[in-house]
Image (cartoon, helix red, strand yellow):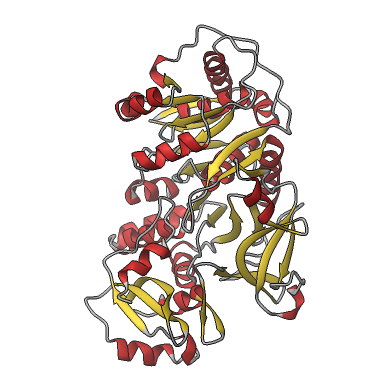
Amino acid sequence: MIELVKKAFNYSKRTAIISNQSEHTFDQLLSKSESIASCILDGQEDLLGGRVVFLIPPSFKYVAIQWAIWRAGGIAVPLCTLHPLPSLKYVIEDSEASILIVTKAYKESLEPLSKQLNIRLILVEDLTDSYLAELPNISMERRAMILYTSGTTSKPKGVVTTHKNIQFQIESLVKAWKWESNDRILNILPLHHIHGIINVLCCALWAGASCEFLPKFDSKKVWDKISSGQLTLFMAVPTIYFKLIDFWESSSKKQKTTLSEGVKKLRLMVSGSAALPISVLEKWKDITSHILLERYGMTEIGMALSNSYKGERRPGHVGLPLPGVQIRLVDTFGNDIRNTGNPGEIQIKGPNVFKEYWKKPKATIDSYQDGWFKSGDIAVFNKGMYKILGRDSVDIIKSGGYKISALEIEDVLCRHSKIKECAVIGIPDKEWGEVVAASLILSEKNIDFIDLKLWLKEFLPSYKIPRKFIIQEELPRNTLGKVTKNVLKNSFEL
């Protein structure tokens, strides 16, 4: 029996999941997942690593199905409820799934595909609790889950993690962030992504804590929850914090006080999955007295770096390696340059690192250098902490011989009183290779670009100041709130 499930027996009567205004105990989660596992097996002794894709909104049913797949010996492949049919089809086909589990709401759109691909379709509403089979013994070395990358630069790749990988990722965070059984967290993150699955859901259940779901994101409802005094932790992406700040700023003076006082009762608030502008961190601190804990991770490695739970949380930095994780910073030749102060690629070793890219042996081999996983993210080691400069393919702009961090420029732009949000990219240029360009979301009707450039000169050298600006109503984002910078490039006239 996998350790996550085994631990649940210790918490039997405690509340595990809160969803749809109902509370569900660990006993109920164990019982429901066992009965679903029996239905999935359908007379087989063990799924033996068969891929089971499932399209279930965040809920108790989602968790029970995830656990059932694992307990039946399958590989869980969660689908995104916001993805269009072609994206869902890609994952179903690429994972070579043999079973598809959906709610009735998705039957009409996915039943023709299941017939076309000869995949067994199971409706959640048809699952019963009447039959219990003997469940297989699951080795920790077995493949447990396939999560698909965002596919911003190529087709999405299936990232395979084992039960051992997942357990290490959970234990590392539980230790670093001091999870306890009396914790309660609100999960508003997509459950096809490691942030929502591991950092929030699995860590809570491992510790015997409670995880609450909302049917969909709503700023008022989230504020009501995080200021209620019922929660102890909250984790979100920067886009969510933007929205929560907007709601607070539009509230009455009395309501602002109530919300700010209520949220102080939480013991930890975390931001991740995208760069957090320093201006947002500072604004959130002003509103709530919380310094958001920033960390660094990715689908292939879980979490690798984190600011301190009790010690310094330095704005713009992601701290130090989590327990048991090894980090190095290398140049293009693979030389460790951590202590030189120069930018380099983050590379990772440890039990947290994924097993393989599904059906892509060459891509798996190419993702390593001398046994270290190549993240593709550029950072510097600055006065004892790591600072992320951005992803080499989208956030590092190569202009006139300089390597420029888009994230650094975004941080400065967001300090301007008229700029609400922004995104900086490099666009091709014959003379310079790339030139810096910025898309702005304004808090006021207009802005003078000449005045803006003069203002930027107070903070940035001239080669980092954007040469092109556009004003947009909103930035293109993926389902996790990350700006899709390759899509954004199409908005600039080249």
**206 versus 406 height, above or below:** above
Q: Residue furthest top?
A: 130
Residue at image coords 46%, 30%: 54
- The answer to whether residue 37 shows anywhere in this view is yes
**139 versus 382 height, above or below:** above
- Is 489 displayed left or right of 277 in the figure? left
Splitting the image into 4 quarters, where does residue 49 fall? Answer: top right
Residue at image coords 37%, 62%: 487
Q: Residue furthest left?
A: 445
- The answer to whether residue 459 shows anywhere in this view is no
Give coordinates of residue 460: x percent, y percent: 49, 88
- From the viewer's side, name the closer residue of 352 and 159: 159
**Placement of the N terminus among the 4 image quadrants:** top right
- From the viewer's side, name the closer residue of 68 and 309: 68
Give coordinates of residue 79: x percent, y percent: 45, 37
- From the viewer's side, name the closer residue of 129 and 15: 129
Residue at image coords 28%, 69%: 472
Give coordinates of residue 389: x percent, y percent: 57, 72
Give coordinates of residue 493: x percent, y percent: 30, 75
- From the viewer's side, name the closer residue of 235 and 156: 156
- Is 131 displayed left or right of 225 in the figure? right
